[in-house]
Image: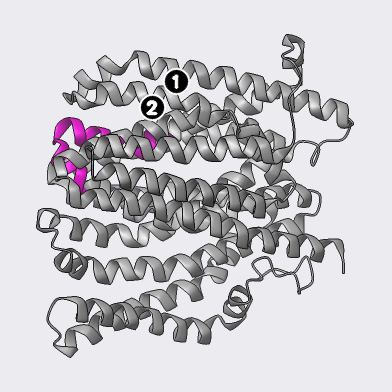
């Protein structure tokens, strides 16, 4: 077995474990938030949506790119033995811990202003709690990165799954005894802190004592660029929710927030799991451009193949789903979800570009893209607001597809010798199968005369899945066989060939 095949097999096994952890983690988070829908009206759910936005804001500062440096350093750089490596990781650990502590204190200190700005008193104490638990959540970040660098994704899966189970027990238990906001905060605290503390023990690595002189070991340019990009990326991805919450109220925010949450399912369940393994693999392929480019295309095919049927089910089933679950207050959700469904697949693909730019040290380009993306998002939301939630959704979707994703893919792939034509040829069979399957399912269910309800929901879902699998097997058989065999990075084919 060649080194390339061995790496591909290791990455394949790791991807399966990463997928398990990611699916359990995100299904528990999404499931818990959907459970809140039954206990809360849209206005109350809007508070949870804002808390989720603040949680993501703090996550921008979690790591400052330090976890990525742990994974890729010494893979792309020469020099330095175990002692130097331990000193570098220790410096990353202490700086990260200090920075995260300051961020947590800042959020807690701004709690009164946050509550007054949104005119939601519950946000005051909630922001204090979020700031308090943030430091603990950050304490195991470097340790988890060490596990990822070692491809110990089975250990990570066990730790994160255990934390999810415990968080679900605590959160659901509290949901029947306290209000939904309190239960949500308890769920997030157990989920983040449990996995972090367990990761510290599992990594079997302890940092050296703090040493101010060790700061020179940190690539501050890399971390600074990545921090700015993450901050701008957060603003661009959440400015729509902040503006809707401020200008149109918590009810509209609750509906839009849930639609947006459903759109991000492929990113959270699929692309994050694959990209998490791809990063350390890319770091080992950086000196082999053909193999590197092939792995990138395979990762994009994996995400596309798995995301299309997921969002196809959401597209055809959202109307009946709202009806059979008796969610009368959420009828405005259906048109937004149908617009967002294909964008969910595209957003999952866009998530994969960050790791490529990080491992090739193009963080300055990422910083520039972050600023560009923010301007485009703000402009698209302002353009859509006069037409309400539907206008914002359409404007956001068009801007992301045409003005953000297309140029980002081009900038990501061009230095690797992959043209956009090659890329589109690799993805076109999967997309054509998805469009045909969804269109056929819609026509078949409409012609069947089934009344709205469970029967039509099941029929439309089955039609999408069966139609997609049949068509995609015909037009992209090799891709399907590889993914069905869980051989995500094609360990059995010659390195250097492209899909």
Q: Is residue 407 visible?
A: yes
Q: Would you name the residue on which mark 1 appears? A: 104
- Image-based side of 84 in relation to 361, left or right: right
- Pick the quarter of the image with the N terminus: bottom right
Q: Residue at x 76, y 60 (%)?
A: 290
Q: Which residue is mark 2?
A: 130
Q: Position of residue 237 (x, y in %)?
A: 37, 40
Q: Give the crowd class for mark 2: few <14, some 14-19, many >=20 residues within 10 Å.
A: many
Q: Is residue 245 magenta?
A: yes
Where in the figure is residue 134, as x and y percent of width and height? 47, 27
Residue shown at the point (71%, 35%) measured from the top left: 70
Q: Is residue 67 magenta?
A: no
Q: Is residue 344 left or right of residue 115?
A: right
Magenta residues, as a range? 234-255
- Mark pair 1, 2: CA separation: 7 Å
Task: Give SS at disc 1.
Answer: helix
Rendering coords of residue 77 (x, y %): 82, 36
Crowd rating for badge 1 (residues with CA inside 10 Å; few <14, some 14–19, many 20+): many
Q: Are marks 1 and 2 in contact (CB under 8 Å)?
A: yes
Residue at x 37% of width, y 17% of height: 108
């Amino acid at each position: 077995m060649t080194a390339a095949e061995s790496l591909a097999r290791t990455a394949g096994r790791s991807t399966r474990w990463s997928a398990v952890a990611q699916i359990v983690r995100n299904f528990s988070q999404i499931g818990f938030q959907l459970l809140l829908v039954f206990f809360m009206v849209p206005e109350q759910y809007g508070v949870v949506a804002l808390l989720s936005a603040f949680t993501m804001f703090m996550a921008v500062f979690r790591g400052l790119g330090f976890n990525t440096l742990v994974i890729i350093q010494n893979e792309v750089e020469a020099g330095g033995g175990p002692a130097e490596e331990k000193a570098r990781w220790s410096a990353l650990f202490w700086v990260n811990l200090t920075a995260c502590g300051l961020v947590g204190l800042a959020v807690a200190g701004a709690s009164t202003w946050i509550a007054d700005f949104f005119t939601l008193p519950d946000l005051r104490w909630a922001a204090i709690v979020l700031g308090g638990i943030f430091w603990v959540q950050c304490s195991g970040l470097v340790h988890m990165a060490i596990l990822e660098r070692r491809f110990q994704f089975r250990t990570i899966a066990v730790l994160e799954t255990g934390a999810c189970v415990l968080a679900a027990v605590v959160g659901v238990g509290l949901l029947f005894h306290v209000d939904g906001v309190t239960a949500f905060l308890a769920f997030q605290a157990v989920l983040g802190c449990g996995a972090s503390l367990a990761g510290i023990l599992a990594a079997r690595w302890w940092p050296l004592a703090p040493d101010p002189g060790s700061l020179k070991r940190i690539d501050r340019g890399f971390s600074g660029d990545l921090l700015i990009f993450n901050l701008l990326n957060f603003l661009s991805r959440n400015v729509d929710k902040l503006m809707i919450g401020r200008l149109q109220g918590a009810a509209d925010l609750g509906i839009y927030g849930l639609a947006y949450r459903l759109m991000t399912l492929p990113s959270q369940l699929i692309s994050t799991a694959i990209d998490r393994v791809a990063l350390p693999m890319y770091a080992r392929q950086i000196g082999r451009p053909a193999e590197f480019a092939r792995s990138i295309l395979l990762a994009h095919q994996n995400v596309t193949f798995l995301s299309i049927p997921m969002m196809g089910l959401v597209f055809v089933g959202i109307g009946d789903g709202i009806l059979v679950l008796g969610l009368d207050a959420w009828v405005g959700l259906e048109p937004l979800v149908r617009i967002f469904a294909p964008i969910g697949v595209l957003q999952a693909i866009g998530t994969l570009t960050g790791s490529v730019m990080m491992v090739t040290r193009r963080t300055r380009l990422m910083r520039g893209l972050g600023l560009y993306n923010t301007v485009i998002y703000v402009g698209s939301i302002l353009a859509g607001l006069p037409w309400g939630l539907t206008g914002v959704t359409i404007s956001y979707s068009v801007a992301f597809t045409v003005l953000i994703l297309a140029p980002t893919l081009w900038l990501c792939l061009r230095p690797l010798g992959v043209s956009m034509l090659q890329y589109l040829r690799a993805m076109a069979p999967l997309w054509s199968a998805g469009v045909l399957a969804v269109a056929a399912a819609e026509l078949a269910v409409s012609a069947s005369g089934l009344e709205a309800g469970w029967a039509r929901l099941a029929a439309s879902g089955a039609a999408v899945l069966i139609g997609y699998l049949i068509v995609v097997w015909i037009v992209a058989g090799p891709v399907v066989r590889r993914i069905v065999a869980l051989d995500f990075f094609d360990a059995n084919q010659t390195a250097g060939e492209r899909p």
